[in-house]
Image (tube, helix red, strand yellow):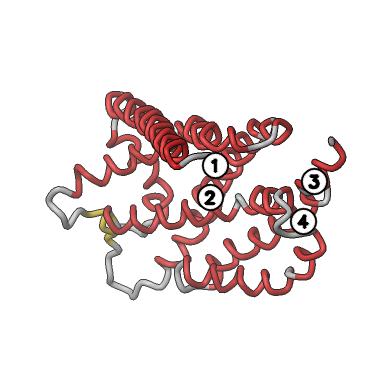
Amino acid sequence: MSENQKEESFVSHLVELRSRLMKAVGAILLIAIVLMIYPGSARIYKFVAAPLMASLPAGGTMIATDVIGVFFVPLKVTLLVAFLIALPWVLYQMWAFIAPGLYQHEKKLAMPLIVSSTLLFFAGMSFAYLVVFPSLFPILFGYAPEGVTVSTDIEKYWSFALTMFIAFGITFETPVVLAVLTRAGIVTVQQLKEFRGYFIVAAFVIAAVVTPPDVLSQLFLAVPLVILYEVGIWVSMLIKPRKKAEAETA
């Protein structure tokens, strides 16, 4: 391939990447606009804040210390919800960009990967919202000294909630990540088994860094991470590495 052909190929890849990004961002913005019209950013934020509001002690409330926070925080929440709704489409655009460089039998993995990645990410966020938040907030608020009214700033709560959503969403992607690594031949099932002990330590370290400084929240993240690692090993046992699969189909 000549230099001109390489340059044209590189430019065509950039054009394709820009097109895929525009389609993904466009879908997110369109969904966000619809959500702002109905049900509205305020209602969406109220839903996200429901676990905290239900756990606040008597007299507790949420406050906004930033003048523009009452506008931008619900808007940020709406954009996240729009991204989650558009996530299958976004993942498809990512896959469509890299698909031309893959073998035909690997392209067939597109739909299972997109579906499983989306469902697992949603499962992680749902676990944080439905299980972790309702269990964690009463314990944290229970440490408030007598006579102190708990008032949480909406910006700080959103920052905390977003961190937890992302942490648990990514955590629940562990089986997919291990399956992809095994399929690509980067790791083997035996290596994953040998790394198990190190991963358990790493899981608790990650949980200690990401979650609030209490044992319960760290367990809520570390234990599912370890369980999902085991699930990932089991799934990887059912997958043939890329080179082996190619040899069998040759």
Residue matched to label 2: 169
For mark 3, does the 10 Å Cα neighbourhood hold few (<14), some (14 to 19), or many (20 or more) residues?
some
The amino acid on which the numbered mark 3 sits, given as a three-letter code, is: Ile
Measured from the top left, where is residue 228 in percent x and y? 69, 55
Tell me which amino acid carries mark 4.
Answer: Ile
Query: SS of the residue at dot 1?
Result: helix
State the image coordinates of residue 71 (x, y, percent, origin top left): 19, 42
Q: Nearer the viewer, mark 1 or mark 4?
A: 4
Q: Are marks 2 and 1 in contact (CB under 8 Å)?
A: yes
Q: Which residue has dot 1 on it?
A: 122
Q: Quick check: can you spot residue 59? A: no
- Which quarter of the figure has residue 233? bottom right
Q: Which residue is mark 3?
A: 239
Quadrant position of the C terminus in the picture: top right
Residue marked by disc 4: 233
Q: How many marks?
A: 4
Cα gap from disc 2 to disc 1, whole angstroms: 7 Å
Looking at the image, residue 125 sits to the left or right of residue 4; the answer is: right
User: Do residues under tags 1 and 3 come within 8 Å of each other at their CB atoms?
Assistant: no
